[in-house]
Image: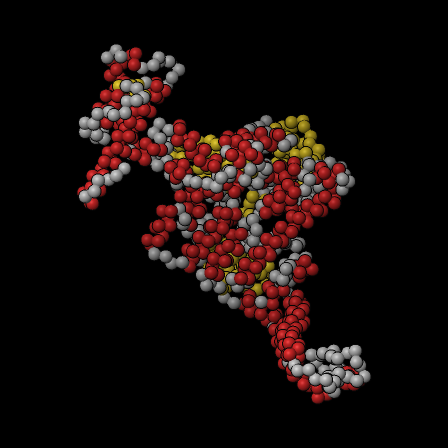
Amino acid sequence: EGEERVAGDRGDLRQKRGRLPDPTDPTATRAAAAMMATKTAAATLAAATLPAFLAWLLLASFAPHRPRRSPLAAPAAPARTLPRLRTSPPRSSSPAVSASLPASPLKKLKRRLGLHAAAAAASASARHVRAAASKEGAKGDDMLSRHYDLLIIGGGPTGCAAAEKAAYGGRETMVVDDPGSGAKLQLGGPTGLFSKALRDTAARVDVALLKAMGMSDKSIWSQVQDMCKEIALVETQNTVRRLRGVAVPRVQAKAAFTSPNTVELQLRNGKTVPVAADKFLIATGSSAFQAEGIPFDARRVFNSDSIKELSYLPSSVAITGAGIIAIEYAKIFTKLGAKVTLIVRDESFNAAMERVGIDSDIATALKDDLLESGVNLRFSTVVGDFNVPPSLSKPIEIQLRDRQRNRPTGETLEVDTYLFAAGRNPNTQGLGLEAAGVMVDERGRVLVDENLMTSVPGVYAAGDVLGPPGLASTGIEQGAAAVGHMFDKKSEAEADSRRESGFDPKSYLSDPDRFPVGIWTSPEVAYIGLTKRNAEAKDIEAIEGVAKYSDTTRGRVSRSRGILKLVVDGGERDLPVIGVSIFGEDACELVHYGMELVQSRRPLRKVLEASHAAVTYHELYKVAASAIDESLEFSVAMRSAFDLTTLRDARSRFQEALQQQSVAGKIARTPQRSVTKTQTQIMMAATIPALEAEEIAAELGLMDSIPLEDKTTSEELTYKQFLEYLRNVHNRNTLEDSGSKSTEDTGTPLVA
């Protein structure tokens, strides 16, 4: 309690010490307790004295006027009527005080003001706090010697979310977080928090304008760093506050298993303490992959983790990678005024984006935006030899190599900074997994079953330690699902229901397409579910619709460019949404409505019927849904009236009617055939007599013998008109059936 109260008080202690407070540090605990004792005594005295003093003033104002002089007035000091009040007796008697106020009125005044009680309360409170401070070291030892229901290794978003869920369930939980070397400002935030903070900061800081005003690069970068650190610190404070709110202790230490039910904690002061628990959750996340042959120094040559240590504003940057992190930093440094070169191993940008799961049209739009921003792209290229001068005033020289031919390209890049952002490794080294019997694969990723439990019963894993997709959102859900399986003993029916809905641990592990992915470029990229190409690879009859930002009112007002693609399963009658891809402004926010559509497999009809607030980008969903509806052979309205079997039978009957006309020599009824037209195009343009359409409707059981009433369009029906005629007959029969039933039930005919 003492550690968290002091550490959480607006980050004051955190700023003074330069790092998060350690609950096991007795020196910091005693200092914090002494400070708290002083503050508490002063607050107690003020709280006890002020109300009594105000009450005395109120009573004095209503007291009857007496002409005689008050006994409180001192004859020797007429300008001072009240003495300086003390909460404890002075070390030496003061002649001024004794002379200015007689003893009897002084005691009476003290009793009236309640000063004796205030002094006693303040003294007792101070003694209590000092006694508590003397026991703080014992409290820290007691916290580490306690037996826990759940011990979580890792203080990232996965571990902290799992700790909160377990605490809400009444489980005694501890979070062990390895701060690493140096100060750690980030707790509970995702790995990419720095890049997001840097992106927003770069958007607010106009580097070109500041340089034109005469500010140095050092001053500009110092401002950027301060803004990023402030964002990270706020995130850390929020996490500490949430953990404190659910009474989850957090220890900064290195953890390693010594047995299946015990871990050994190496504290920052070097002390080693064993801690036992019933369940364990490994949520240590991942770290940047470092390729061989690259001289990483965290000064001029960085990976995607050490880039946070960048201490200057670079004017030129080379980045290796074509994933989410690499593209984000390429746009960020471009926004900060740097000349950026993106080195891509793949032969094309679309091929690299396809491996990440991005739609080809979205990839093309992103590539065009990178080129327009001034990013230089080098495909089928890798880095070779480095020459890194010790002075920042001299550029780094990087030899480029052709990846396919495995020979130098002859090009040498001269840049201020190099960033390698291609891949991540799970943080499983040094955890003592072998001692516990936890199995990992050849890349160090923890192997788990469908319930996220490792090869050791009671030991679970979640997040980046499992491998792809490596998203903070999936890690949080995996951690919560693991805790649910540990302690929530649900019935078999409930478990089956969760499996069917896709919200069980196995789905979180094996179906990453159910979770949204955001790329914080500018404009943003976001997607969830399947692209059309990925769906077709799974033998799904995918149909996609495209909406441009300029198709919406807000897009025309803001003149924003971008696209939204909606993918549905055309093999099902209700056309459920299976994928959404967006490129443009606010894409990372818009994707969450798409997440609801994909995860719930909403029918396309629901998208068309949805009502959104005016002048918003959510209108894109309706535009894309309308594009799909217009491209369908069987529209949404037709699918609502008939099942797919009936519609396919109607199509076959229409084709048979066309063949009969052709055999009968009635070629004039059909348009001129072209060798370039497909059979579907020919059928869509051909017509049949309205009477034949009536016969087909009767054969399909849609009518008995009802004359065709609506012949206003023509006596010949195209394929679309034929299907619309069948739907009208169906709707008329449905209305008549409803009217007949209403008459039978109430005796009153149905009034249209």
- The residue nearer to you, when weighing 269 against 134, is 134
Q: Which residue ends up furthest to the right in the rendered image?
A: 76
| Residue 657: x %, y % from top left | 25, 19
Q: Residue at x 37, y 50 (%)?
A: 498
| Residue 191: x %, y % from top left | 57, 47
| Residue 392: x %, y % from top left | 75, 40
Horizontal relation, residue 174 to residue 642: left or right: right
Q: Residue at x 19, y 29 (%)?
A: 704
Q: Residue at x 30, y 34 (%)?
A: 641
Q: Residue at x 66, y 54 (%)?
A: 182
- The residue nearer to you, when weighing 684 against 518, is 684
Task: Determine which quarter of the picture holds residue 603.
Answer: top left
Q: Which residue ends up furthest to the bottom in the rendered image?
A: 104
Residue 530 lies, with reference to residue 490, above or below; the image says above
Number of numbered markers: 0
Residue 96 lies, with reference to residue 576, above or below; the image says below
Question: How is colour applied across the structure in the image?
Answer: secondary structure
| Residue 135: x %, y % from top left | 61, 73
Horizontal relation, residue 541 to residue 732: left or right: right
Horizontal relation, residue 112 to residue 741: left or right: right
Residue 371 lies, with reference to residue 76, above or below; the image says above
Residue 283 seen: no
Residue 223 seen: yes
Quarter containing the C terminus? top left
- The residue nearer to you, when weighing 687 against 452, is 687
Quarter containing the N terminus? bottom right
